[in-house]
Image (cartoon, grey):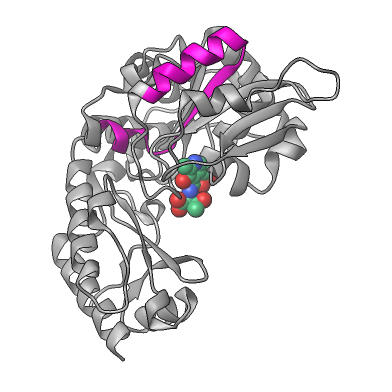
Amino acid sequence: MNRLIDLRSDTVTKPTPEMRKAMFEAEVGDDVLGEDPTTNALQEKAAHLLGKEAALFVASGTMGNQLSIKAHTQPGDEVIIEGGGHAMNLEGGAGAVISGVQFSGIPGNRGIFDAAQVEEAIRAEDAHLPVSRLVVIENTHNRGGGSVFPLKNILEIREVCTRRGVRMHMDGARLWNACVASGISPQEYAAPFDSVSVCLSKGLGCPAGSLVLGSKDFIKRVHRFRKMVGGGMRQIGFLSAAGIYALDHHIKRMEEDHRKAKKLAQGLATIKNIRINPEEVETNILFFDVSPSERTAKEVAAATIKRGVRVHPTAKTSIRCVTHLDVSFDEIDQALEVIAGVMKS
Ligand code: TLP
């Protein structure tokens, strides 16, 4: 059998030989003492790329989002986010535990919402009500199907937030995909936000790591919270070297991942008992529905894995596929054959 085709997530990628070489050769030091030269270089590079004063390496996207929420809020505050947002739904309830905040999930269209919705969601000043402190925007939006958040909406939301004294954080786990798909630079996307978190270990193909970006004061606060949760690590230059390599070599190529996702979606649309609109696929994530087959997503996923293709069931009849640098165009064809075979059987 050919090797397993893993479409569950872009987190499954393994470092390329060139990335491994960069990691192997990295100069390292103790980052808790601020002495890891490669991590310092990565943080400077990322701050420059996103046009923010400072950046901090953190272990994961979850740590990046949750420490940002912590640094922006007080216990009892409310965080406004789209109802399917990762920071509210898929981070183990961390907002309640780490920051003591509650979330207000607003409805989105494939994860996208607008300024009027934010205006409505921001609470009035009243002792009965929580304080609306922060808006979180996810770009691209994972459960929205890799949708790209329009810059126009972000700028209009910024205007509302500035007027109402509310801060803004971007969960940019896949910001790079949004930039490649839209042609908007990371700096333009980051400018309206008080803070941004970006991931190195998704489409960029690094083994681990994320970055939080913002003002120097904000990053100082995040740095303290990183220590509190045990996220201060020592010779992480090995990971940072992978990050520098990926920022230099793995952003532009994501355009390929987007074409692979489109090809996959178009193929899936021709398979009986699958529902998907390929027009909606903007980046490297797609969802399809298997309800016409009267089988559950888990049953379909269990059948495809037997034939060498891993997909990710996300709800009773919904399956997610993500393309990435460890899956080729040929493997997309093979995956389509397998899925078509499973849906026929
Ligand atoms: N998403 C993972 C899993 O949690 C499902 C994935 O496979 O897509 N923000 C967004 C938008 C994300 O998609 C993720 C990870 C995170 C934050 C958290 O990143 P990690 O997993 O590094 O903590």
In the picture as drawn, the residue positioned furthest to the bottom comes out as 345
Left or right, 212 with reference to 188: right
Q: How many labels does the image show?
A: 0
Q: Is the magenta stretch mostly helix, strand or loop?
A: helix
Q: Quadrant of residue 80?
A: top right
* Vertical order, 265 against 116 (above or below): below
Asked if residue 203 lies in the magenta stretch, the reply is no
The boundaries of the magenta stretch are 153-179
Quarter of the figure with residue 288: bottom left
Residue lying at 26% horizontally and 57% vertically, measured from the top left = 326
Residue at left offset 79%, top offset 27%:
76
Residue 217 spot, x, y in % from top left: 59, 8
- Tell me the quarter of the image containing the N terminus: bottom left
Residue at x 23% of width, y 36% of height: 181
Can residue 56 be seen in this snapshot? no
The percent position of residue 158, horizontal first and vertical second, equals 47, 15
Is 165 contained in the magenta span? yes
Q: Where is residue 61 in the image (x, y as percent from the top left)?
A: 51, 39
Task: Please name the residue shown 34% across and 53% down the image.
Answer: 14
Q: Quadrant of the C terminus?
A: bottom left
Q: Give how far across and how far down residue 243 sits, in percent.
A: 36, 34
